[in-house]
Amino acid sequence: MLCPVECGALPSVAWPDRGLSSLSVLPTPSKIWEKQRYSSIYKIIEDYSKQRHAQKVSNSLLTSRGLDCNEPNLPLDPRQWSREDVARWIQYVSTTHHLPTVHLERFAMNGKALCLMSMDMFVSRVPLGGKLLYKDFQLKLSRALYS
């Protein structure tokens, strides 16, 4: 059996009227200090998490309203995109979604040429992320056609 002192606690004085026996263990000041120290770390982490969540919510609201500050200024209709517009769009999407490096020379075309590409053609040019690029492009094209 371990002695309370070996466990990092101090034995208390016997106070039968308070329900404490001579074997009751009270935490040492160092244990109390550790709890306070860890609680402040947890508080910092919790505050940071709340700030990140609020930032993500505000960014998603801005993005859903089409006010994303990082989004390149492209024509709303992808069929009107130039080669440079296509390159800026690919860089933006790959950066936003943390895709591996996309070789822009594989997309040396304008917006009309992108309209003719199938999902398989996107995936053959960008194996990790081609499907996402295709869906994002189709979403932009649908918005232009049906709005």
Image (cartoon, rainbow, N blue to C red):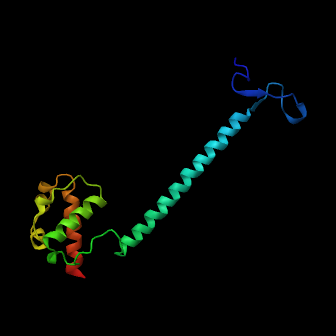
Q: Quadrant of the N terminus?
A: top right
Q: Residue furthest right?
A: 17
Q: Residue furthest bottom?
A: 147
Q: Position of residue 120 (x, y in %)?
A: 12, 58
Count of numbered labels shown in the rendering: 0
- The reply, left or right, for residue 81 in relation to residue 33 is left
User: Hey, which quadrant is residue 84 in on the image?
Assistant: bottom left
Q: Position of residue 117 (x, y in %)?
A: 10, 65
> Which residue does the image show at 64% across and 43% down from the upper left?
37
- The reply, left or right, for residue 64 in relation to residue 147 is right
Viewer-closest of 71 and 77: 71
> Which residue does the image show at 12% across and 56% down from the upper left?
125
Residue 119 sits above or below residue 16 on the image: below
- The reply, left or right, for residue 64 in relation to residue 13 is left
Residue 133 sits above or below residue 77 on the image: above
Viewer-closest of 103 and 43: 103
Q: Position of residue 65 (x, y in %)?
A: 37, 76
Q: Quadrant of the C terminus?
A: bottom left
User: Hey, which quadrant is residue 133 in on the image?
Assistant: bottom left
Q: Residue furthest front?
A: 84
> Which residue does the image show at 31% across and 61% down from the upper left?
96
Q: Position of residue 31 (x, y in %)?
A: 69, 35
> Which residue does the image show at 41% across and 67% down from the upper left?
59
- The reply, left or right, for residue 10 in relation to residue 74 is right
Viewer-closest of 74 and 142: 74
